[in-house]
Structure formats: C-alpha cells, structure tokens
Amino acid sequence: MTVSGKQLLLEAALRLTANNRNLKSLGIRELAREAGLNPNTFYRHFSDIDDLGLAAIDQLAARLRQPLRHLRREAACRAEEASHADGPELFGVSLGRGRKVCHQTVVLFFDFVADNPQAIMLGVRELQGPSAVLRKALHLMISGLATDMAEDIIELELLPKRVDPQAIEQVARLITRNLLQMSLDYINQPEQRDSIRALAEEQVVMLFTGAMVLHEAGQLKLPV
Amino acid sequence: MTVSGKQLLLEAALRLTANNRNLKSLGIRELAREAGLNPNTFYRHFSDIDDLGLAAIDQLAARLRQPLRHLRREAACRAEEASHADGPELFGVSLGRGRKVCHQTVVLFFDFVADNPQAIMLGVRELQGPSAVLRKALHLMISGLATDMAEDIIELELLPKRVDPQAIEQVARLITRNLLQMSLDYINQPEQRDSIRALAEEQVVMLFTGAMVLHEAGQLKLPV
DNA sequence: CCGCCAAGTATACAAGTGTCTACATTGAGT
DNA sequence: ACTCAATGTAGACACTTGTATACTTGGCGG
C-alpha cells in the first residue's frame, strides 16, 4: 500500500516545521522535495500553503480533542481510586483530590505531547505565525479545547458549583493556552521534562486555587 | 541630523516584522529596500540577520528593564496612597493592596506595550522563532525581567516573607511570560484591550493568591 | 477494450535572493 | 591639506522560488 500524495505532503510539512520553522517559510518546492514529489504535484492537492496548513490543523484537532477528553476521565478515575478525601479541604473541595486530578491530567497531556511532537509544534507556532487564516483556525480549535475542559471541570466538580461558568471557561482557556505554550519547551528541552511538567502542574493548581479563593472572597471579576 | 544606517536598518526590521512576520523571513534585500539603502550596506553593520536580531533585542531590553522597575514602584505608590489596609486579608497580606498593586502594574505595563508595539512583537515572536541564538537571548532577557520582578515582590511584600524566594522567582517568570504573551493579543486586538488587560490582571492575582494559599497549606512544590 | 480523469511529471520563465568584488563618498584626525 | 577608515553604492553571479503550459501514467466505469 502506498500513501496518498496529500498525506505525504502533510507529513513532509510536519517534518520540516519540526525544526522551529514557519509553514510559510517552507516553500512549495522544498515541501515537494521533502515529500519526494514533483513541485507541481502540490497544486493537485492544495491551492495554497495556507490550505495545507488548514488541513494540518484539522488533523491536529481530530487527534487532540476526543483523546484529551478521554484523558481527563482517565485522570479523574485514577485520582479517585488512589485515595478518598484525604488532605486539606478548601471551600468544600478536596485539595488533595484536585491536585491528583491535575497531576494525572498534566502527566497524560504531556505524554500525548511527547507522542505527537511535530503536530503540536506546528500548531503552537502558527498560533502566532504570519498567516491570519491559520491563526484564526487555531484560536477556534483552542476555544473548543477550552470549552471541553470547562465542561469537564464542572462535571468532575474540580471547582465549587457556584463559580460562574463563564469564569470557569476563562480559567480553562488560560490553562489550555499555557499548557500548549509549555509543551514547546517540553518538546525542545527533553532533559528538563520532569521539571517542566511539575511547573505546569503547579501553575494549574495555583490558578485553580486562586480562582476558588477569589471567588469565595467575592473578588473574582473575570471579564466577558 | 541624519540617522545612522544601522539604526535605519533596525527600524526597518521593526516595521517589517510588525505585520506578523519573522526576522529570518525578511531577507537582506527587502530590509535594505525598506531602509532606503543598498543591499550591501547591511553587511557594513551586521554579519547576519541573527546579528541584527541580537542588536534589536539589546535595544528592547534596554527600553524594557529599568522602565519596568520604575513602573512597579510607581504602581506600589499609587496603590499605597489610594487607601490603607482595606478589604479582606489573607495570611497577613492585604488582598486589597495586592490587587491594587497588580492593577496598577498591569495597567502601566500595557501602556508601555501600546507605546512600543513593534519591539514587543518582535521579541515575543522570535521567542519561538527559527533562530536558536535569538531564542536564547530572549530567554535570558525574560529571566532578567523575572528576577527583577521577584526582587520587587519581596521588597514590596506582595507575598508573605516566608515564601521560598525560588518559588517567588518561578511565579515571577510565569507572570512575565504570560504578560508578554498577552501583549501580542493586546496589540493585535485594539477593540478588546480593556478586556485583555482585565483578564491579565485577574490571572496575575489568581497566581499570587494561589501561590499564597498553597504555600500556607504546605502544598507549594515548585521545582528547581 | 476504450476513454477518461485524477495524480504525477518535465520543462521553462520571470522574479527575487545572498553575497562577492570593485568602486565612490564622506568626514575626522593629524 | 592629506590620509585613512568607515560607510555607502554598483554590478554581477549562481541559486532558489512560484507558477504556467504541456506531457505521461495508471486505474476504474462503461
């Protein structure tokens, strides 16, 4: 079985952008060369490099979205069975449990990152890349991820129920962006992975805790 | 008085990278054209585009570092005089005062961003750009900013004195990175500036609060 | 078996690029 | 007034790039 040329080109793009490069900086010829194809074959599948970028983003979203939800369920389960209601509480939510869910989620997330480094890198880079189209598409994808996460937070009761759903969504969006940002470091600095993962986890816990405390103190004022 | 060619080239680079473009994607000829100079003149001042990038980063750091410290003092003063010891307290630190310092700092920071958008954009973009040299230089600069901020946090007593200085440094680094990240949005979405500023402020407050609470609960475990 | 269409190829051209060598201008110090 | 170094310019060379036109291939439906 031979792979379709379209897929060959997409994979070539992933390979080439892996070394901190831009999609638009690739050039159709280079791309085709890497894919082992004739330059003009590119046009049989894509009209534009942005077009290819959109396809890549679609694939990334497909590989990210459902798996991430699944991951979070799994993390919650693992945290659940590890121990019941230990550690200090804060406003009726177990700090210990929240911490464990965060830990598991973050661990599994970074495992995922380590498994799909190229796609993640492409996504995070193009998030601030030169193409407005791709930026928009990626922001949309991240919004989706954040919404998923917010739903899970509510469902798994990681924050008190009375916290404004919109505030939760904002927290989720923040966490999502930061985790993606950090995954670049995670990929590029393999020798510091443990430390980066721990830092990310700490940040997530801090944001959760801060959101909780501020909410209880009536000081949470997230904008729409 | 005529400006030096070197400065002309640097300014041309800022102008061209302002539109979401990469330094390396510019091309020496384009750069010289924008600066109104002969292509070869570039080599009289820089050996490389990375070389120019380093010069730009140096200028950025000079324009950022001292002003930011000054800004923070000013913010603290303004918060001080606004009102003494109002609002709820948490572990001996006034929430109201901390919030005001954050508010003032963030406001002044984003004012600064609005005043130097091009330099900021270049910096944030190259932070994950294709050139390893520039990435390294920028990380160094950010480290410096974070260290400054940590010192100020301790000096202004925005966190309890007993919190580990290394933990403070990590929090500061986190905040610095995120503020810089957000300043891109701030620049590119002028119609949402108020909302972005408010969100950034909220995030900073959340991180502070979270760090404090976790520290008091003995749960703060930031890695080295 | 024919014909057709998608996928891939070959060749070509204009335009832009990095950078080399050689030349011109300036301006400050002696 | 003369020199010398710094700064800027001109022209050229070998490449790479995007893309247009025209050609080949291979497999599938009729």
Image (cartoon, coloured by chain):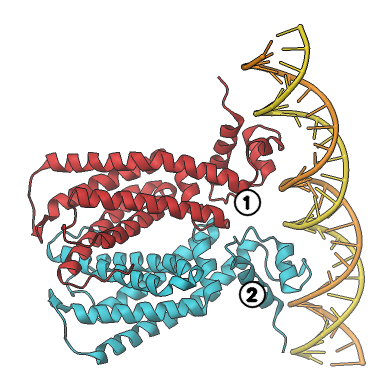
Chain colours: A red, B cyan, C yellow, D orange
Q: Is residue A84 above or below residue B75?
A: above
Please tell me which residue lies in front, B221 or A11.
Answer: A11
Q: Residue at x 64, y 75 (%)?
A: B11
Q: Please tell me how many numbered marks the rendered image carries.
A: 2
Mark 2 residue element? helix
Comparing B203 with A142, the one in front is: A142
Label of residue B11 in the image: 2
Secondary structure type for disc 1: loop
Separation of residues labelled 2 and 1 (CA atoms): 22 Å
Q: Is residue B6 left or right of residue B19?
A: right
* Kind of residue sitting beneath label 1: Ser
Residue B223 visible in the displayed image: no
Residue B135, position in %: x, y?
A: 50, 60
Residue A159 image point, x, y percent: 18, 57
Q: Amino acid at mark 2?
A: Glu
Dot 1 surroundings within 10 Å: few (below 14), some, or many (20 or more)? some
Question: Which residue is disc 1 drawn over?
Answer: A25
A185 vs A165, left or right, is right
Q: Position of residue B149 (x, y in %)?
A: 34, 75
Residue B202: name its quadrant. Answer: bottom left
The reply, left or right, for residue A173 in relation to residue A134 is left
Q: Residue at x 36, y 57 (%)?
A: A178
* Residue D28 image-quadrant placement: top right
Label 2: how many residues lie within 10 Å, few (<14), some (14-19) or many (20+)?
some
